[in-house]
Image: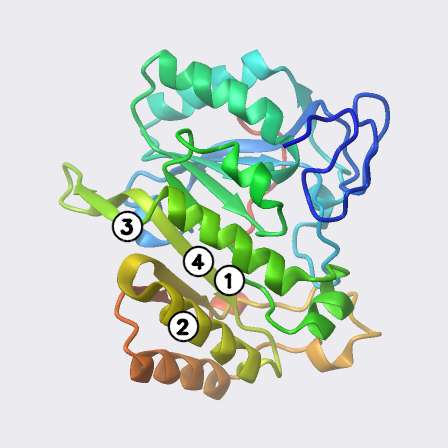
Amino acid sequence: MTDYKECRLCPRECSTDRNIKTGYCKEKSELHVSRAALHMWEEPCISGSKGSGTIFFSGCNMGCVFCQNKKISRGETGKIISFERLVEIFFELKEKGANNINLVTGDIYIPTLIKAIDKAKAQGIGIPFLFNTSSYLKVDSIRALEGLIDIYLPDFKYIRDEDAIRYSRAKGYGEVAKAAIAEMVRQQPACRFFEDEQGQYLIKNGVIVRHLLMPGMLIQAKMIVKYLYETYKDNIYISLMNQYTPNGELEDYPEINRKVAEWEYKSLIEYADKLGVVNGYIQEGETASESFIPDFDLTGV
C-alpha cells in the first residue's frame, strides 16, 4: 500500500501528492470529518438500541451521479482534525454508549486510520471497529487494515461495467469489488455475534455486504446476490436495500430518476430466498421517503 505522497490507494491511481494538493477524491491527506455521533439507521446488529459510533469522513473516490451525500463526498463541508483528535473521538463515542466505531468512507484516509485504530486498541478501547466502504479499493489497501478492522460493511454496487461507468465513473468496479470483498472475507471469514444487556445480538466480527437496488436494475441486483451467495454461502450477511431516492440532479439520467418500484424489491427478496439466502437483511415500508442522512453539521468533531 502506498502513502499519500503518490496516492494509489484506489484503482484510479491518480498518483497525486496529497500532502500538497487534492487527489481525485477531492481531499488532501489531512483528516476531513463532517460528523461523529451515534447513528441508529444501520443494520440492527450494528446500531442495536444504543447506536453505532459513526464518523463521516469528507471526500470520496467514486463519482455517483445519484449521490445523496454530495456535501461531504465533494469535500464541501467538514473540519480538518488531527489523528490525535480522531483517537479522542473514538473514545468519546464509546463513552456515549456506541456499540462500535463506524468509519464511513474512510477509504481515502487508510494510512492515518491505521495509526489511529492501532493507538485506540493499544489504549484498550474494547469495542469493534467497522469499515464502511464503497469497495472501490485496491486489495493492498484493505490488506493493510488486517488485525485492525473487526467488521467490514462493503457496498457491492454494480457487476456490469457499463453501469459502473455511466452512473459512478468507476471503470472496472465489479472486478475491483469482488477482489476487495474477497480480501475482507479472508480477514473475517465468519460472522460472530454477542448479546448485549438489552438482549440484542450485535455483530462482533464479520462481513455484511450491502446492495442498493436501483430503478430498472433488478437483473443486475439478482446477478450480484447470486454471485455473493454462491461464493460465500452463509459466511457473510447480505443486506438488500430499497432506499434509493433521486437527488434532483438526474435530468440526464431519466432511467434512474425515480424510486424503486415495490414489485422490483419484492422480486429481489423472493429471488434471494429461492437461492437459499438466510443470513440477510431487508428493508420494510417506505424507506425511500425516510431520511437516512443526518445533518453534516460538525456534531462531535
Label 4 Cα neighbours within 10 Å, binned few <14 / some 14-19 / many ≥20: many
Q: Please say if the residues under marks 4 and 2 sit with CB atoms less than 8 Å apart.
A: no
Which comes before the other along the chain, label 2 or label 1?
Answer: 2
In the image, residue 160 sits, relative to residue 191, either above or below, namely below
Which comes before the other along the chain, label 1 or label 3?
Answer: 3
- Mark 2 belongs to which amino acid? Gly
Which comes before the other along the chain, label 4 or label 1?
Answer: 4
Q: Which residue is drawn at 35% across and 44% down?
A: 188
Image side of residue 253 versus residue 155, left or right? right
- Tell me the quarter of the image containing the N terminus: top right
Residue at the disc numbered 4: 209
How far apart are the alpha carbons under marks 2 and 1?
10 Å
How far apart are the alpha carbons under marks 1 and 3?
32 Å
Query: Which mark is in front, 4 or 2?
Result: 4
- Mark 3 belongs to which amino acid? Ala
**Residue 216 at x, y percent in the picture:** 62, 83
Which comes before the other along the chain, label 4 or label 3?
Answer: 3
Residue at the disc numbered 3: 190
The quarter holding residue 246 reads bottom right
**Residue 262 at x, y percent in the picture:** 47, 84
- Mark 1 belongs to which amino acid? Glu
Q: Would you say residue 197 is visible in this rendering?
A: yes
Q: Would you say residue 291 is visible in this rendering?
A: no
Residue at the disc numbered 1: 290
- Mark 4 belongs to which amino acid? Val
SS at mark 2 in the image: loop
Label 2 Cα neighbours within 10 Å, binned few <14 / some 14-19 / many ≥20: few
SS at mark 4 in the image: strand
User: Which numbered dot is residue 198?
Assistant: none
